[in-house]
Image: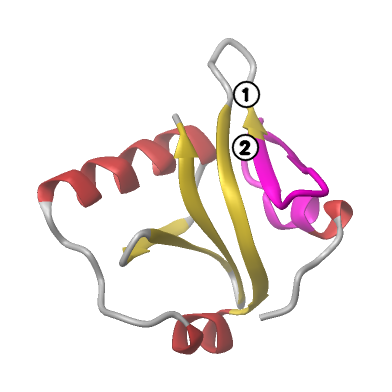
Amino acid sequence: IVEMKNTDISNFFDQGTVEVTVESDNTITFSKPYSGDITAKFIGMGSYDEVKDALPGGLSLDESSQSQTTFLNKYLGNYDINKIGDKFLIRNGSQAVVIQKDRW
């Protein structure tokens, strides 16, 4: 998994009105007009297949995980979002980003 620059992350999150910034400590912040901010730990970005294969474990299908995934879909926009362990795999086309929940 390759860490990318702020512009690459912003280009990845191109669906919707969310502004994205990555701090030097790998904290990623999603800001949306008229909504609160979401912060998470940025784990990495790369091609979907490579990123998916690098994450250990299977999909988390419990009620809490599904609620968190639904919330992220509503907040971020039209992305394929899955929870694997304690990390979220967010897909946009052939690329994927992995984040870990911090505050939302």
Q: In this view, does 77 lie above or below 19?
A: below
Q: What amino acid type is highlighted by mark number 1?
A: Lys
Magenta residues?
Answer: 9-29
Name the residue rendered at 65%, 68% in the picture: 44
Q: In this view, does 98 lie to the left or right of 104?
A: right
Check contact, mark 2 vs mark 1: CB within 8 A: yes
Q: Nearer the viewer, residue 14 or 30?
A: 30
For the N terminus, the image quarter is bottom right
Q: Splitting the image into 4 quarters, where does residue 45 fall?
A: bottom right
Q: Residue 16 carries which label?
A: 2
Name the residue rendered at 57%, 88% in the picture: 50
Residue at mark 1: 32
The crowd level at tag 2 (other Cα within 10 Å; few <14, some 14-19, many 20+) is few
Q: In this view, does 16 lie above or below 63?
A: above
Q: In the orientation shown, which residue stands out farthest toward the top?
A: 34
Q: Is residue 74 magenta?
A: no
For the C terminus, the image quarter is top left
Q: Splitting the image into 4 quarters, where does residue 95 fall?
A: bottom right
Name the residue rendered at 46%, 89% in the picture: 53
Q: Distance between the residues labelled 2 and 1?
A: 9 Å
